[in-house]
Amino acid sequence: MDILASNKYKMPSISLILSFYNQTGPFELLLASLEQQSFKDFEVVIADDGSSKESVERLNSLIDRSKLKFKYIRQEDKGHRKSRILNKAILESEAEYLMIIDPDCILHPRCMEEHFRYREKKVVIAGRRVDLSPELSTRISPELIHNGWVWGKFVKTILLDGLRNRTKHAENAIYIRNRLVRSRLNRKEKGILGSHFSLYRKDIMDVNGFDERFTSYAGEDTDLDNRLRRNGVKIKSLKHIAIQYHIYHPISTANQSIMEVVESNNSEGITFTPYGIAKNEGQE
């Protein structure tokens, strides 16, 4: 055997890109779920939008204790610039297949496996999520994730909480293995959830990534969804297959002026935003 060949670096199959801003508590839960993934061939790229010194120190402490492979990309805190740091993280990622998530979530142990299994060129895989109630969110710990309680006995609790109209989309917690049932449940095409989607690097590069004019909560995912579709990319939903549990937090409202960017791109039929990864001369 050629020793040099055997030691050759192998690029990860998935680059998991997650936006981050001071959410060390939820990140600790997410990290526990990443360590439980059945799919192991991935790197974690943290896109930090200017977290505090204390949060960065806590983040580093969690990373140091983990065996996962990390990249850390940070920019100075100049307000909400999530789109900008995500674009930077895309450039720094290594894999040809990207999965983009938020840090305030927990992934089912087969979530990344399912994303990779269903991957297709010119297709975005859109997983679905369970929006946990405040009460259920506080019951989860890294220890309970590691011992499998969250996707075991806790599922029944989630469903009961959904019947009480506390947890939203509780039915999404049910993991289905049967291929025929899976296909029938996912006939209807749904949009991208910014907290949970994957696609080939080329497909997001072809539309120049996220539009960096989105500088407040919401809008960037809807705009990306629209531009990808106009560029011939289809959205494939994996309800009851790629499952995510979303930790409760108050929902911010979208700034109307920001949503006008979505409307402008739509009316002009924009696919390749000039405010994305590749910049025009004079842009930051």
Image: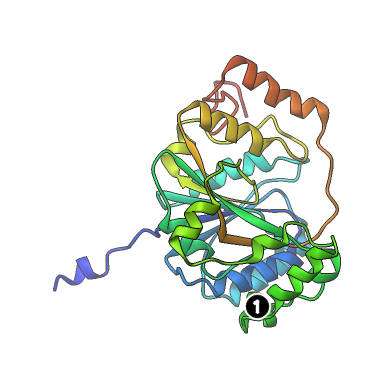
Label 1 crowd bin: few (<14), some (14–19), many (20+), radius 10 Å: many
Instruction: Tell whether 135 sits left or right of 26.
Output: right
Q: Evaluate whether residue 219 shows in this view.
A: yes
Q: Position of residue 40 (x, y in %)?
A: 45, 69
Residue shown at the point (63%, 44%) measured from the top left: 85
Q: Quadrant of residue 147?
A: bottom right
Q: Residue at x 41, y 58 (%)?
A: 117
The C terminus sits in image quarter: top right
Task: Name the outermost residue toward the top.
Answer: 268
Q: Nearer the viewer, residue 57 or 132?
A: 132
Residue 14, visible in the rendered structure: no
Which residue is drawn at the image coordinates 71% and 33% (left, top)?
214
The part of the image, by quadrant, that contains residue 87 is: top right
Q: Is residue 209 above or below residue 184?
A: above
Counting from the top left corner in percent of width and height, residue 143 is at: 68, 82
Q: Is 208 in front, or is 111? A: 111
Give x and y (percent) for residue 84.
63, 39
Which amino acid is tagged 1? Ile
Is the residue 173 above or below the residue 143 in the image?
above
Which quarter of the picture shows residue 109?
Answer: bottom right
Residue under pointer 1: 145
The reply, left or right, for residue 229 in relation to residue 75 is left
Element class at badge 1 = helix
Decide: is 67 above or below 249.
below
User: Residue, x 72% and y 50% (percent of image)?
Assistant: 50
